[in-house]
Image (cartoon, rainbow, N blue to C red):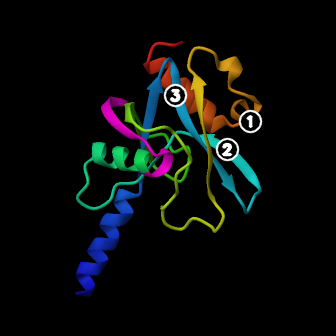
């Protein structure tokens, strides 16, 4: 039984090395979520996403994460970016192009493991891919968020 538990722990750890993100696009805008980190008292914007759960496909993971984090049912269109540059706690990021099937975006919840109390999604916002000057100072000062927005712009032909 112990060997089985160790194997399960290794599988879960492997699943958490990749972050599956959803670039939800509508009318030339992409939806981002704004997090609040109570430890640093910092807020930041990011592409919604998370990790695979056991027996879940990548597309199912993205759909579940979009339901949880922004309260939307989405259609996963295709893989946009498969990036193995470590820019956060994850070794790899896979970003999928998504379209809204139903719902209105609103802050959901962050059920991921090891999140501090008070850490969570506080806002959703649409960011125009063709007008980076409208993204705001908080986005432009966050190298990770700007990098993701630029990648999405490039792949979708906005640059």
Magenta span: helix, strand or loop, mainly?
strand
Image: 80 above or below 33: above
Q: Are marks 3 and 2 in contact (CB under 8 Å)?
A: no
Residue 55 is left or right of residue 92, and the answer is left
Q: Are marks 1 and 2 in contact (CB under 8 Å)?
A: yes
Left or right: 88, with 2 as reference point: right
| Quadrant of res 93 | top left
Q: Which mark is residue 138?
A: 1
Question: Magenta segment, which residues?
Answer: 68-80
Q: Mark 3 to mark 2: distance in Å?
A: 16 Å
Residue 131 screen position, x and y as percent: 63, 15
Residue placed at 69% from the left, 56% from the top?
Answer: 37
Q: Secondary structure at mark 3?
A: strand
Q: Nearer the viewer, residue 108 or 96?
A: 108
What residue lies at 42% left-to-right and 44% top-to-bottom? 66
Asked if the stretch drawn in magenta spans residue 8, the answer is: no
Residue 20: x and y, percent? 40, 45
Is residue 108 found left or right of 6 in the rendered image?
right
Secondary structure at numbered mark 1: helix
Q: Nearer the viewer, residue 139 or 5?
A: 139
Q: Give the number of the mark in front: 3 or 2.
A: 3
Q: Write the residue at 64% across / 68% down.
A: 117
Q: Is residue 132 above or below residue 88?
A: above
């Amino acid at each position: 039984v112990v060997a089985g538990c160790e194997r399960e722990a290794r599988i879960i750890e492997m699943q958490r090395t990749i972050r599956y993100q959803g670039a939800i696009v509508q009318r030339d805008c992409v939806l981002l979520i704004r997090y609040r980190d109570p430890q640093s008292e910092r807020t930041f914007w990011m592409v919604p996403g998370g990790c695979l759960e056991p027996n879940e496909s990548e597309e199912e993971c993205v759909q579940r994460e979009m339901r949880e984090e922004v309260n939307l049912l989405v259609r996963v269109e295709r893989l946009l970016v498969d990036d193995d540059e470590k820019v956060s706690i994850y070794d790899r990021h896979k970003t999928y192009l998504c379209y809204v099937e139903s719902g209105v975006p609103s802050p959901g919840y962050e059920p991921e493991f090891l999140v501090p109390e008070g850490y969570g999604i506080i806002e959703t916002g649409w960011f125009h891919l063709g007008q980076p000057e409208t993204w705001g100072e908080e986005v432009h000062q966050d190298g990770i968020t700007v990098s993701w927005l630029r990648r999405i712009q490039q792949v979708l032909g906005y640059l």
